[in-house]
Image (cartoon, rainbow, N blue to C red):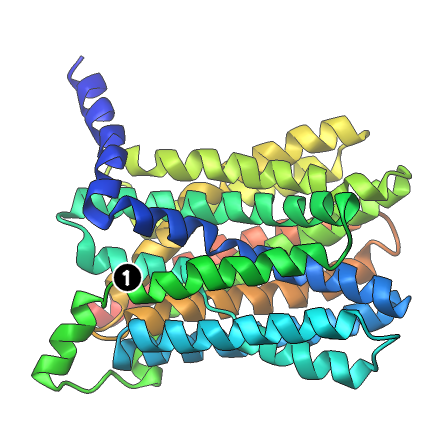
C-alpha cells in the first residue's frame, strides 16, 4: 500500500509541471519541436517532387542533416554565454526566412542542386534544438530533484511523440494538399511557437552568470565531462539509423514501402510510454545502470526484429524494442545535465543531439550495405549498436571511477 501511494505521488508530479513552467510555455515547447522532425522528411519529399530525382533529394537532405549536427552545439554554446532569449529569437527568425526561401524555390521550375543546398544547409544550421533547450530550462525551473526527474521524463516523451507526429503530419498533409504544405506549416510553427519560446523568459542560470560575470566553461572541458552520455547517445543514434534503414528494406521486401514509417513509429510509441514511467524507477538504479540495461534491451529487440516473418510481427517487435529506449534516453540526458560544469548545460545537451545525428548517419550507411544481402542483416547492425552502447558505457564508468580513486 505504501509503495502504491509513493507511485501515485510520483506520477502526480506531472500535474505540477504546467504550474511551474506555465501552460503557454509547455504548449509552445511541445509544438515548437515538431519542425525538427518535420523538416528532414519534408525536405526529402519536397525536393523529390520538384526535381524528380531521389538522389538529388537525398543529397540535399544530407546537407541539411549535417548542418543540423554542426549548428545545434553552436546554438547551445550561444545560449550558455548569452541566455536563451536573444539566440533563440534571432536564430529562430533566420530559420523562418530559410523556410520561406525554400517555399519560394519550390514554385520555380526545377531549381538547381546548388540553389537547394544553398537554402537547406542554412535551414539546418539555424534549426533551433528546442527540445534540448527546454530540458536546460528545467534545471533552473525545477523546485526539487523529484520534479526535475519528472520534467526530464516528460521531455523525453515529448521528443518521442514529436518524432512520431512530425513525419506522420508530413505524410498526411502532403497527400491531402501538396508537398510544399508541410513546409508552410513548419514555417508557421517556427514563427508562432519557436520564437515565442525564446521570448517567454530568460533562463535564471544565464542571468546569474551575467551578474557574476563568470565566463562559460571551455568546450573541451564540457565535452570531457559528458563523455559517457555523448558516447551512449552516439550509439543510440546508430541504433535509430540502422533500425530505420532495415525497416525500410523490410517494408520494400513485402511490397509495402509506404508503411515503413508507420511500422517504425511503433518503436517511438513504446519509447514514449516507458519514458513517462522512467520517473518511477528507484534511485538506487543509477543512470549509468539504466543506460547499460537500455543498451542490452535494444540489442535484444533488434535481434527479435531480425526474426520477424511478417509486417505485423515486426510491428510488435518494434514496439518491444522501443520499451528499452525510453528510460535509457532519459538517463542519458539526466547524466549529461548532472555531469556538465556550471554554465555548460545548453552546450552539453545540444551536443547530444549532434552525436545522435552522427550515429544515425554512420549506421544508416552500414545498414544500407548490410540490407543489400538480406533485410534481416541490417538489424544485426542495430543489435551491435546496442551492445556497444552497453559495453562502452560500462567501461567508461569503471575507468572514471578508477581515476577518481587515484
- Please indicate whether residue 174 sits to the left or right of residue 76 in the image: right
Q: Residue at x 60, y 39 (%)?
A: 267
Q: Quadrant of residue 210?
A: bottom left
Q: Quadrant of residue 193?
A: bottom left
User: Which residue in the rendered view is the most extreme toward the top?
Assistant: 1
Q: Is residue 326 above or below residue 135?
A: above
- Please indicate whether residue 310 sits to the left or right of residue 76 in the image: right
Please give the residue where the numbered disc 1 appears in the rendered image: 200
Which is more toward the observer, 319 or 42?
42
- Please indicate whether residue 209 sits to the left or right of residue 237 in the image: left
Q: Is residue 354 above or below residue 132?
A: below
**Callout 1: few (<14), some (14-19), or many (20+) C-alpha neighbours within 10 Å?**
some
Q: Residue at x 58, y 56 (%)?
A: 37
User: Which residue in the rendered view is the most extreme toward the left?
Assistant: 212
Q: Quadrant of residue 278?
A: top left
Q: Quadrant of the C terminus?
A: bottom left
- Please indicate whether residue 267 sits to the left or right of residue 49 in the image: left
Residue 55, position in %: x, y? 86, 70
Instruction: Kindly tell me whether residue 118 is visible in this rendering.
Output: yes
Residue 21, position in %: x, y? 24, 49
Residue 173, position in %: x, y? 70, 46
Circle 1 sits in a helix, a strand or a loop, which is it?
helix
Q: Is residue 281 above or below residue 49?
A: above
How many circles with numbers are drawn on the protein?
1
Which is more toward the observer, 50 or 364?
50
Q: Residue at x 79, y 67 (%)?
A: 47
Q: Quadrant of the N terminus?
A: top left
Amino acid at each position: 500500500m505504501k509503495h502504491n501511494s509513493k507511485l501515485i505521488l510520483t506520477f502526480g508530479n506531472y500535474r505540477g509541471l504546467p504550474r511551474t513552467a506555465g501552460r503557454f510555455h509547455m504548449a509552445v515547447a511541445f509544438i515548437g519541436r515538431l519542425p525538427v522532425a518535420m523538416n528532414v522528411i519534408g525536405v526529402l519529399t519536397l525536393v523529390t517532387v520538384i526535381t524528380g530525382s531521389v538522389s538529388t533529394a537525398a543529397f540535399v537532405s544530407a546537407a541539411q542533416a549535417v548542418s543540423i549536427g554542426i549548428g545545434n552545439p553552436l546554438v547551445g554554446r550561444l545560449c550558455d554565454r548569452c541566455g536563451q532569449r536573444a539566440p533563440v529569437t534571432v536564430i529562430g527568425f533566420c530559420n523562418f526566412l530559410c523556410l520561406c526561401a525554400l517555399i519560394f524555390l519550390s514554385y520555380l521550375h526545377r531549381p538547381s542542386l546548388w540553389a537547394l543546398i544553398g537554402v537547406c544547409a542554412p535551414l539546418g544550421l539555424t534549426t533551433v534544438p528546442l527540445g534540448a533547450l527546454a530540458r536546460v530550462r528545467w534545471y533552473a525551473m525545477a523546485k526539487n530533484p523529484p520534479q526535475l526527474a519528472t520534467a526530464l521524463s516528460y521531455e523525453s516523451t515529448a521528443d518521442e511523440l514529436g518524432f512520431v507526429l512530425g513525419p506522420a503530419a508530413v505524410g498526411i498533409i502532403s497527400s491531402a494538399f501538396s508537398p510544399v504544405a508541410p513546409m508552410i506549416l513548419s514555417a508557421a510553427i517556427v514563427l508562432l511557437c519557436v520564437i515565442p519560446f525564446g521570448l517567454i523568459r530568460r533562463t535564471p542560470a544565464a542571468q546569474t552568470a551575467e551578474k557574476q560575470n563568470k565566463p562559460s566553461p571551455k568546450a573541451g572541458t564540457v565535452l570531457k565531462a559528458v563523455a559517457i552520455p555523448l558516447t551512449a547517445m552516439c550509439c543510440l543514434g546508430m541504433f535509430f539509423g540502422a533500425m530505420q534503414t532495415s525497416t525500410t528494406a523490410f517494408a520494400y521486401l513485402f511490397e509495402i514501402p509506404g508503411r515503413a514509417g508507420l511500422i517504425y513509429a511503433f518503436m517511438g510509441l513504446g519509447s514514449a510510454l516507458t519514458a513517462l514511467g522512467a520517473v518511477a524507477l528507484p534511485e538506487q538504479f543509477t543512470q549509468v545502470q539504466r543506460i547499460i540495461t537500455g543498451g542490452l534491451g535494444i540489442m535484444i529487440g533488434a535481434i527479435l526484429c531480425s526474426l520477424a516473418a511478417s509486417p505485423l510481427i515486426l510491428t510488435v517487435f518494434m514496439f518491444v524494442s522501443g520499451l528499452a529506449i525510453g528510460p535509457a534516453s532519459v538517463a542519458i540526458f539526466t547524466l549529461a545535465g548532472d555531469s556538465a560544469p556550471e554554465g555548460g548545460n545548453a552546450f552539453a545537451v545540444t551536443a547530444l543531439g549532434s552525436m545522435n545525428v552522427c550515429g544515425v548517419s554512420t549506421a544508416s550507411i552500414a545498414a544500407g550495405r548490410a540490407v543489400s544481402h538480406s533485410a534481416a542483416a541490417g538489424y544485426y547492425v542495430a543489435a551491435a549498436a546496442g551492445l556497444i552502447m552497453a559495453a562502452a558505457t560500462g567501461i567508461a564508468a569503471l575507468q572514471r571511477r578508477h581515476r577518481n580513486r587515484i
